[in-house]
Amino acid sequence: HGPPPRSAGSSLCLPCSWFTEVKAGTMSFQRFVEVGRVALVSYGPDEGKLCVIVDVVDQNRALVDGPISVTGVHRQTINFRSLALTPFTVKIGRNAREKSLKAAIAKAEVLPKWEATSWAKKRALRKTRATESDFSRFEKQLKRSTRARKINQTVKRLKKSA
């Protein structure tokens, strides 16, 4: 829906429901680009891997590090558009080295927390479905249909006896 038509000389009057109400003293955003923010690479050769923002280069790019031994991401600059910020942060200083970054990730237990999120579970499910064979999809369909048939038979039997 677009804004209502305006006649010449009329003031713009928009319904209140068009604006999100923000309480005083609260911020609408919760995930900020900051040193120590854990992010998911959403584009490029490292797509789907977690990394940590180590430094902000400019308004478009960040220096990130996996580290390679933990998540498989080399230290590199990545555009913010290729990153999806997660709700997790680790306590590190700017340009933290690999050793201190590994320790901070282990201390914050980032990887187990990430695996427990619905975001990670959906990504894993999508990945397994993409690698499934046609025969395994067929077997799943057969199992679903036999299960549905059994449920329907039980429901019919219960309705008859009631």
Image (cartoon, rainbow, N blue to C red):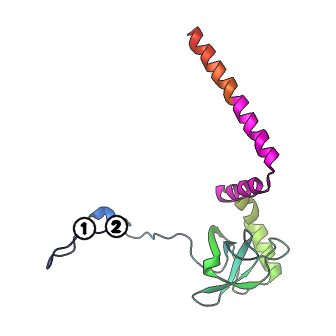
Q: According to the image, label 2 marks what residue?
A: 19
Question: On the rendered image, what quadrant is the N terminus found in?
Answer: bottom left
- Is disc 2 placed on a helix, strand or loop? loop
Q: Nearer the viewer, mark 1 or mark 2?
A: 1
Quadrant of the image occupied by residue 23: bottom left
Q: Does the magenta stretch include residue 127?
A: yes
* Residue closer to the observer: 159 or 141: 141
Q: Residue at x 65, y 55 (%)?
A: 118
Q: Residue at x 66, y 25 (%)?
A: 151
Quadrant of the image occupied by residue 138: top right
Q: For label 2, count other residues whose C-alpha is less than 10 Å away and answer few (under 14), some (14-19) or many (20+).
A: few
Q: Residue at x 16, y 74 (%)?
A: 7
Q: Can residue 61 be seen in this view?
A: yes
Q: Which amino acid does label 2 sit on?
A: Phe
Does residue 134 appear to the left or right of 12 in the view shown? right
Coordinates of residue 156 in the picture (x, y in percent): 60, 17
Quadrant of the image occupied by residue 100: bottom right
Q: Is the magenta stretch mostly helix, strand or loop?
A: helix
Mark carried by residue 96: none
* Residue closer to the observer: 51 or 134: 134
Which residue is at the far right? 69
Coordinates of residue 20 in the picture (x, y in percent): 37, 65
* Residue closer to the observer: 142 or 36: 142
Q: According to the image, label 1 marks what residue?
A: 4
Which mark is first along the chain, 2 or 1?
A: 1
Which residue is at the far left? 9
Question: On the rendered image, what quadrant is the C terminus found in?
Answer: top right
Q: Can residue 109 be seen in this view?
A: no
Residue range highlighted in magenta: 118-147
Coordinates of residue 78 in the picture (x, y in percent): 68, 83
